[in-house]
Image (cartoon, grey):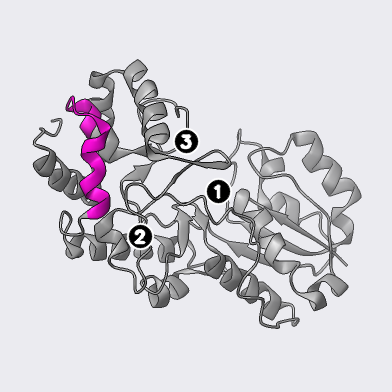
Amino acid sequence: MLYSVYGNCQADALSVLLHQSPKFCRRYQLARLPACFLITEDQARDWAATRAPEVRLLITQKLRKGWREGKEVFDTDWLATHCAPNARRFQWSDMHYAAYEPHMTYPVTFYRLPPTDYVNLLHLLSFAGGLDWPRLAPFYTDPTLFPQALVQAAHARDLAELARREADCNVQIAPFISDHWRSERLFLTFNHPGRAVMRHAAHQILTGVNVARPLPETGPHGFDTASGLPLLAAFDAALATPERRGFDGGFYIGDRTVDTASYFGQWEASLTQLGREAAQAELAAQMRNDPIKRELLTHAARHLGVDLPG
């Protein structure tokens, strides 16, 4: 029988885990769909006409109706209507959990800059204050610079938001995170789950199609396990087994690990082109209506001896 998985980069990661079940592989063959943000209208219509009538299992990310260009061809419900009669359907919400790294986010006032899509708000703060990036080192080595109450608040806020988004999904990870968020680092970045989370999600699908067997605890899961950046010391200290990578623990760019000077040096070049006023505007936008980021940056600004914008 054919199955398809449709969504963001987490879709391919789910397939990687599902294929580690021999019983699942004997029963299902993948009818591949490109990622939801890459698929073309022609590709979606071709799949619907040629492959979907034989798809007996459809696994999709929860996407808002008309989410892309207002076209139904990219919607999960439209794809589902072309599958085989009585096809099984599983749905997950975007697996997004930023509590380990509330200082890492997407920019909101400017386009994403090289060398990565994510902006480090602490680096933005030091740059806006005219400080050199090495001044950030204590945040990665001293666990007392941010209170544990902030760590707990970041977790509670992100867990509640995730539980709300996936309340109507039959693949859920919020309960697993609630039980295990301190036991190990469950997310490599805020939108790249670690193997334990992806394994939990895949197991719910395998159980739903009656082929459940414990998946291997180690092995590939679709995301490079080295891609996570070093954690701030206070957030690392919350883990049962802290990573203790520190400021020189290796930073990730693209598909490779680089040294600290290279990582921040490349970002410094991009921020210099952006300018300090733009950096301050971005900080203000990030803090607006986000008490976690505001508290984080308030503590950081106090330590660095710089003023917050606004």
Q: Residue 70 magenta-drawn?
A: no
> Dot 2, how many residues are within 10 Å of its Cα: few (below 14), some (14-19), or many (20+)?
some
Q: Which of marks 1 and 3 is nearer the N terminus?
A: 1
Amino acid type of the residue tagged 1 in the rendering? Arg
- Marks 3 and 2, Cα distance to the nearest angstrom? 20 Å
Q: Is residue 138 magenta?
A: yes
Pinpoint residue 42: horizontal percent, then vertical percent: 80, 35
- Identity, as a three-letter code, of the amino acid under mark 3: Asp
Who's the residue at 84% across and 54% down the image? 52
The correct choice, above or below, for 78 with respect to 218 in the image is above
What residue does disc 3 label? 117
User: Considering only order in the chain, which callout, 2 or 1, is on the residue closer to the N terminus?
Assistant: 1
Query: Which quadrant is the C terminus positioned in?
Result: top left
Residue tagged 1: 64
From the top left corner, tell me how far across and down residue 50 is, in percent.
91, 48
Measured from the top left, where is residue 117 in percent x and y?
A: 47, 36
* Residue annotated with mark 2: 158
Q: Main secondary structure of the magenta part?
A: helix
Q: Which region of the structure is painted magenta?
A: 126-141
